Each structure stands twice: as structure tokens, then as C-alpha cells.
Image (cartoon, grey):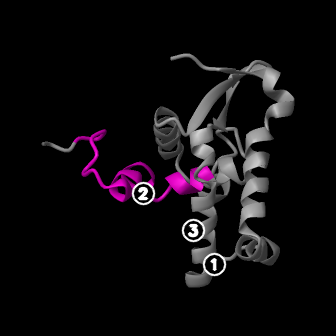
Amino acid sequence: MPVGKDTPRSNCPIACTLDLLGDRWTLVVLRDVLLGQRRLFSEIAADEGIATNTLTGRLERLTKAGLLERKQDIRDGRSHRYVPTERGLELIPVIIELMIWGSKHTSGSVPAELLARAVGDREALLSELTEQARNFDADTAESFVTETE
């Protein structure tokens, strides 16, 4: 069977996940939306130097996969926010584990307090981060509408 852009290379869940998330930018985009509470195109991965066409592609792919929702800001019809879905929120533990591993095995750094909580009180931290990501837009939810295709 030929493997196309949207065809998984195998039935292995790790391979399928890497097909969706396994490039240089996708987890950085998710990190910013899920943990950094960055929702606007101009905010996401802004500190990383991602090209706008690359960011557009990653946001489209994550939206198509049901990890993010693109919502229009009613106050400014030109602006859109990228909001995590429940499916996207389930990736928070993965991102935290990558943060722990990366702080141990790479030159990357993370605030000591966050790392201590991730290692020492992981479940409480995950619960807190998930609720923050889920409720970040709650106060202004009436200002956004889900975009229809």
C-alpha cells in the first residue's frame, strides 16, 4: 500500500504519533498553546524563530487532527485564537515528560521550581496545567466563535 501524506506508515501507535507530532516545530507549537497560554498566531513560537508558512502548516495540521480549534475573535474579525481541545490537552503529560528528559540530557534549561514540581508532585502539576490550559479563555469565551469549514 502506498504511503501518502495522510496515510500512516504502520499500525504502530508510536509511528502514527510521530507522523503527527514528530517534526522540529509541532511540539514547540503545542508547548506554547498548552503551557504558555499563547493563543494568537503572532504569539505562538514567537521566541523560536519559526517561519510563518511553517507555523501556518503546523496549526492547520493540529487543527485537522482535532488537537486545536481555530476560533475567530468576534471583537476583531481578523484575529483567530488556537484553543486546545480535550484531545490536545491529553498531550500535556507528554510535553512535561519531554521537558524533564530534556533538562536532564540536553543543554536546555527549565525553572528549578517547575522541574522540582514535575518530578516531585507530577500529578498535581499536570492537573493544574490542564485546568489552566482548559480555562485560559473561559473569561472571554463569549468573544470567540468556532470557525466553520
Residue 118's quadrant in the figure?
bottom right
- Residue sticking out furthest to the left: 1
Question: What amino acid is labelled 2 in the image?
Answer: Gly
Query: Where residue 112 appears, x then y in whole percent?
Result: 79, 78
Q: Does residue 24 show up magenta in the picture?
A: yes
**Which contiguous range is marked in magenta?**
4-30
Circle 2 crowding by C-alpha within 10 Å: few under 14, some 14–19, many from 20: few
Secondary structure state at the residue bearing disc 1: helix
Relative to 69, say whether 108 is above or below: below
Question: What amino acid is labelled 1 in the image?
Answer: Ser
Q: Residue at x 57, y 41 (%)?
A: 87
Query: Where residue 2 appears, x then y in whole percent?
Result: 14, 42
Query: Where residue 19 appears, x then y in whole percent?
Result: 36, 51
Secondary structure state at the residue bearing disc 2: loop
Q: CA distance from mark 2 to mark 3?
A: 13 Å
Which residue was labeled with disc 1? 103
Residue 37 visible, this angle? no
Q: CA distance from mark 2 to mark 1?
A: 19 Å
Q: Earlier in the sequence, mark 2 or mark 3?
A: 2
